[in-house]
Amino acid sequence: MIYLDNAATSRPKPPEVIGAMTSFMTDVCANSGRSAHRLAVQASRIIYEAREAIAELFNVPDPLQIVFTLNATESINLALKGFLKSGDHVITSSMEHNSVMRPLRFLEQQGIELTMVKCSSNGIIDPGDVKKSIRKKTKLIVLNHASNVIGSIQPAEEIGLLSREYGLLFMLDAAQTAGAYPVDAQRMNVDILAFSGHKSLLGPPGTGGLYIRQDVDIIPLKQGGTGSRSEEEYQPDFLPDKYESGTPNLPGIAGLGAGVRFVIQEGIESIRKKEIELTQEIIDGLASIPVVEVYGEFESEKRVGVISFNIESMSPSEAGFRLDDEYEIMCRVGLHCAPVAHKTIGTFPDGTVRLSVGIFNTKDEVDMVIGAVKDISLT
Amino acid sequence: MIYLDNAATSRPKPPEVIGAMTSFMTDVCANSGRSAHRLAVQASRIIYEAREAIAELFNVPDPLQIVFTLNATESINLALKGFLKSGDHVITSSMEHNSVMRPLRFLEQQGIELTMVKCSSNGIIDPGDVKKSIRKKTKLIVLNHASNVIGSIQPAEEIGLLSREYGLLFMLDAAQTAGAYPVDAQRMNVDILAFSGHKSLLGPPGTGGLYIRQDVDIIPLKQGGTGSRSEEEYQPDFLPDKYESGTPNLPGIAGLGAGVRFVIQEGIESIRKKEIELTQEIIDGLASIPVVEVYGEFESEKRVGVISFNIESMSPSEAGFRLDDEYEIMCRVGLHCAPVAHKTIGTFPDGTVRLSVGIFNTKDEVDMVIGAVKDISLT
């Protein structure tokens, strides 16, 4: 079996990740930040160590600025809904995932004004177009760091500088880059960084979070018990408690911490290097098949390991079914929860076949996949 | 070591729960409801089976009416914020956890009117008082099924009937009863049932959910990718997708499903019978110590297995520290994220020492705890 659906969730997870989860469930299994007994203290320490690892990876000054959520979608909803007010203007790109588009469309109905800057057919935004869209009421730029459809990497650093220049907040959706590509929150002038825990950070599904720069004021999405300031019927106003109500996904965060430490140990540069190689091999292999169209940049250095393609006169779902059924190759087909991205690259409404590589994929697997696509496209 | 902090999270979890999580992470480890390959289909089936088990336990007609969230706090926020509109009046009790109080206090600042019905010093609400609080603008009654401080069980069925009679929505916070006490959503006329997955349902931390009765319209707390209607930039309007954006806590839900099946197999009646016995033994044992005050009803049939007490001239935190340090007994001290409940029973602001029993506690453990409390209260 060959798994190339890492952009949905990475697979397999390092044994350390599963070990950390099992060890939490078996040995600790207590709530953090609430009771004061030894097991509860142990749970709190494990959660704090995960914050530390993530803060290190994203070059965030203080681990307490890392907030845990259920997933990147929750992180994005938290930030968009808690920051934007009726009458505010927000700028986004035409390559966004529905985790950004759907909350923005919802907010539009509540009086937020939205500009969606059209990207090139290779999925890249022009900072000049962003600049032209800035108005007096503009408060926020929200941008997908890398596309979950074609892997295109946005010029985040330039957009960060632009945001700083105009006094706007800059929010980056790093769901597809965190753990696979360098993400330096301070260097990129990112004010809010949303991340997924179960993709390239190698944690389990059910983990995600966000970094919120100090002094950025966001109304929490949820209020509730935090184990802190228990005497008050109002939400505490300090991080991370302000945004973490109710019992967190403790075994999941334990696993995520182990995943991030695995990434740090491997080194982002070395992970990235391998991803570039495998991605280039897939692009070149697929592009050499006459009836196959590959979307996006052909230089793998300009993208993360997400490759979309189509086979002439074969629907994406048929191609996906055959790859699974005949070759045990797991990929994802269709619109990948990103209709605007497919409109941008011209593959709406049928979508594409998507291959997404992970840290554990090999050159042999990639060769077999290219062979399989060749086979099904010619028979 | 004796663990009596089950109201924070139950411990230990059945081996089946940890097994289901590990098996998900090792053998499946794919996203559900998104891709169509065999692993993704397997993930979707596991999640659906967890919905089925929960629907069976709560007597909910359709498993698709069970929505998964990060925790009960998220479930409560989702329902309160998605249903109540400015100008609406809501009734609650003076025994609520901050998972209800803090969102309500927040909503009050947004123009919602709130009545908090005072309960007896034993933590019980009088349905007559609730009836008297109903106004023309009243839309919802939200009630803690059993207190996380003293275990008092509310007359939920009577409140359900009252809600039905006045055409109000009835929301029950079953965080402390789900899995430990019979919860029949239909018989109790519950429209929205919020539950925690990691307490008596024996699932891992990071799981919870809610049942939403058909035709109850709630605006989602989050919008985003659902793997369904991917061509649309607006949130789908069918359950459970409407309320489940982003990747769910798949290993957690796998574990929760196993936990609920364990509860069903043991039988709620037999679980409840054992809890009544252990709870009565703790109450009687503690009450027999002259310098110890036990709060709430003395008949354990009137409460779930949560017992709060104080030792004369010893702070709850000192008592908790000594129980942990000298006897390896894990309990929780303080306000338990429920300041209004402590005001109601007269233990604000210092709080209490709380012992909470679980399905795996034994008579021997309970005897040792009573002995330990006796020791520290006399030395």
Image (cartoon, coloured by chain):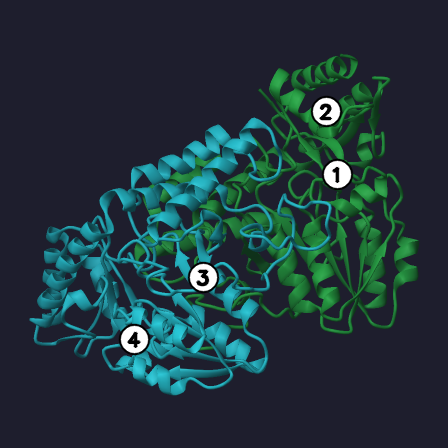
Chain colours: A green, B cyan
Q: Chain of mark 3?
A: A
Q: Are marks 2 and 3 on the same chain?
A: yes
Which label is found at residue A149? 1
Disc 2/disc 3 C-alpha distance (Å): 41 Å
Q: Which amino acid does the dot numbered 1 rest on?
A: Val
Q: How many marks?
A: 4
Disc 2/disc 1 C-alpha distance (Å): 17 Å
Residue A206 makes an appearance in the image? yes
Disc 1/disc 4 C-alpha distance (Å): 53 Å
**Nearest-to-viewer mark from 1 and 4:** 1
Residue B31, given in percent of the width and then of the height, sits at 57, 38
Q: Which amino acid does the dot numbered 3 rest on?
A: Gly
Disc 4/disc 2 C-alpha distance (Å): 59 Å
Tell me, yes or no, whether the two marked residues, 4 and 3, touch with CB atoms within 8 Å. Answer: no
Residue B349, given in percent of the width and then of the height, sits at 33, 80
Q: Are marks 4 and 2 on the same chain?
A: no
Q: Chain of mark 1?
A: A
* Residue position for label 2: A278
Looking at the image, tell me whether mark 1 or mark 3 is earlier in sequence order.
Answer: 1
Q: Is A43 on the left-hand or right-hand side of A297? A: left
**Under tag 3, what secondary structure?**
loop
* Residue position for label 4: B351
Q: Which residue is depicted at the point 53% across and 76% down?
A: B106
* Residue position for label 3: A246
Mark 2 closeness class: few <14, some 14–19, many ≥20 residues within 10 Å: many
For residue B172, above or below residue B123: above
Disc 1/disc 3 C-alpha distance (Å): 34 Å
